[in-house]
Image: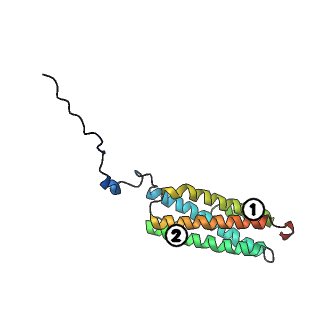
Amino acid sequence: MAPIVTKAPENQPSSPACLAHEAADTYMGFASREEIAAFLNELLEAERAGTGVALRSAQAAQGTPFADLLHDVHLDEARWCAMLLKHLKALGAPASVRVGPFQEKALAIADLRERIAFLNRGQGWVARKLREMLPKVRDDGLHTDLRAMLQAHEVNIARAQATLDGPSDSSP
């Protein structure tokens, strides 16, 4: 007697599409809760550093074309700190209390024009990190806030570069 061979039905998905919403975020290519919390804390530390650099630099830049730019960057950085704290709280994740090492490095640069260029590179680092993480963020509210943060950083980068590219006699 020949063995009975059963053939699986063709074109049958291995799991019903109607259950896809039950799949874990990581299975679907999204970042885990832990990855999101670590990312938000990394950004929080960087934004705190940027806030300190922009505030101290704005004080030093009074009477120069850099003053308004640095004031606005300071307000943006503080706004993003608050947003990041809000999302960490919503995740139930502890918020870092650290200030990133960027602040100390930037404030060690005495020349204001060079410090602003360094600050701009820091803004670029944040923008790059945001671009990398955004496709992995499933939460619509967090995604919207991170996208707004990215857009604000891109505006500040362009604005700072335009100010830096201005007449060199604008440096204090």
Label 1 Cα crowd, 10 Å radius (few <14 / some 14-19 / many 20+): some
Between residues 100 and 21, which one lies in front from this camera angle? 21
Q: Residue at x 49, y 61 (%)?
A: 37
- Which quarter of the rendering shows the N terminus? top left
Residue under pointer 2: 85
- Seen as rendered, the residue at the extreme top is 1
On screen, residue 130 above or below 152 = above
Name the one closer to the observer, 65 or 82.
65
Helix, strand or loop at mark 2? helix
Q: Is residue 65 left or right of residue 101?
A: right
Callout 1 amino acid: Ala
Residue sitting at x 44%, y 65% = 91
Query: Which residue position holds label 1?
Result: 117
Amino acid at dot 2: Leu
Could you tell me residue 8's position as x and y percent?
25, 37
Image quarter for residue 6? Answer: top left
Q: Residue visible at 78% across and 65% down?
A: 164
